[in-house]
Image (cartoon, grey):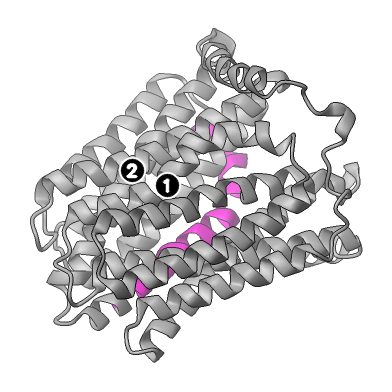
Amino acid sequence: MAVVRDLRVLLRFQGFRRLLGVRLLSQGADGVYQVALATYVVFSPEKQTSAASIASAMAVLLLPYSLVGPFAGVLLDRWRRRQVFLYGNLLRAALACVTAVLMLSHVPDWLFYASALCVTAVNRFVLAGLSAALPRVVDHERLVMANSLSPTAGTLAATAGGGIAFVVRLVASDSDAAVVLVGAALYLCAALASLRIAPELLGPDEELVPPHLATALVGTARGLADGVRHLARPPRREAAWALASMTLMRFCYGALLVMVLMLCRYAWSSSSDDGLALLGLAVGISGAGFFAAAVVTPWAVGRLGPGGWIIACAGAAAILEPALGLPFAPTPMLVAAFVLGLTTQGAKIATDTIVQSSVDDGFRGRIFSVYDVLFNVAFVGAAGIAALILPPDGRSVPLVVTVAVVYGVVATCMFRSGAR
């Protein structure tokens, strides 16, 4: 397979191998920690889970990406990236241990969420640093290949970490604290793995570091505003439409995820263990949809164009989501999880392609920062709105119909915009 051949080529670079090891351990730990947080909030027997508490957990997991993300690069261009991996993962290991203690201590929820928020905020620096360091460990000819394979490997590691979390929780008598400690151990391993990389290898070069931090931060804010204005100009309208469409589709996916969490917890199971097993199955099937999108999208984009593929994904979701969701039964909903995983990820890949091909190179980084903010704020906003709409058992016809209408609007607007 071409992917295996490409990976073999990249693994010949020692720096890439070691950086990839840090990524796999870091993102594997992220998967463990995030599942532990979600199961503690949703599936702890002593907690009366509500859609509002799920929305709070999603905000803790995702808002740091939105608030810290655009400015993380400014600091990463001033700090040695190897040291960011070392101290960032050590800090996360310590904070994860604090989270485990708080889980066992029955402290107020705000204190628990504050601890989790600190862990996920540091995560933004580590992930951005991994991307920024990649050009330092591979040659220019293989950079695109590395940019494709490395994040994919990290996503698979996070998924595997989530699987480990489910297994540990079942083995350790439903102890979410034990799962968090496993995540802390993986963060520590990631910190130790970073020691195998020379401190100066990953940069940045000292002579290129901007002299004034405040000036750099203000410049970043202005740069984001310039990026938005750049999107508003006619030659980039297709990219603007694609970003708006992807934001709405991410919103739909987030709202439905909250609904599935509530259904697994209350409507489809008599115990938290059964509900957790169903949720794990739903997440795995949705992940299979993401993988299918990676296989199908290049073929589909070649025939429909990236804009046409977004229309097809949104249109298919508009039809299939209510057909599969309104029965509120496990089997059709699991099929819907696959379909929505495929359509959401397929639309995202197409959106990435449109942005990369239609936005000027000098603005591309700023546009992707805006994209990152929109992507995560839409998910958190969806969780908040779902919290207002959903009944305690998760069965909500208005939510399913509203999401189908939003998908239909996305398909219609993209078609009328002339996307191809």
Three-letter amino acid code of the residue under disc 2: Val
Label ID, residue 168: none
Image position of 79 with respect to 325: above or below: above
Position of residue 191 measured from the top left corner of the image (x, y, whole percent)? 69, 65
Kindly indicate the quadrant of the structure image that contains residue 3: bottom right
| Residue at position x 18%, y 70% in the image | 47
- The dominant secondary structure in magenta is helix
In this orientation, which residue lies closer to the viewer: 265 or 306? Answer: 265
Label 1 residue SS? helix
Q: Earlier in the sequence, mark 2 or mark 1?
A: 1
Label 2 residue SS? helix
Label ID, residue 62: 1
Q: Which residue is mark 2?
A: 380
Are the residues tagged 2 and 1 within 8 Å (C-beta)? yes
Q: Check the picture and name the quadrant holding the N terminus.
A: bottom right
**Mark pair 2, 1: CA separation:** 7 Å
State which region is magenta.
278-307
| Residue at position x 75%, y 68% in the image | 193
Position of residue 239 measured from the top left corner of the image (x, y, whole percent)? 53, 24
Three-letter amino acid code of the residue under disc 1: Leu
Kindly indicate the quadrant of the structure image that contains residue 350: top right
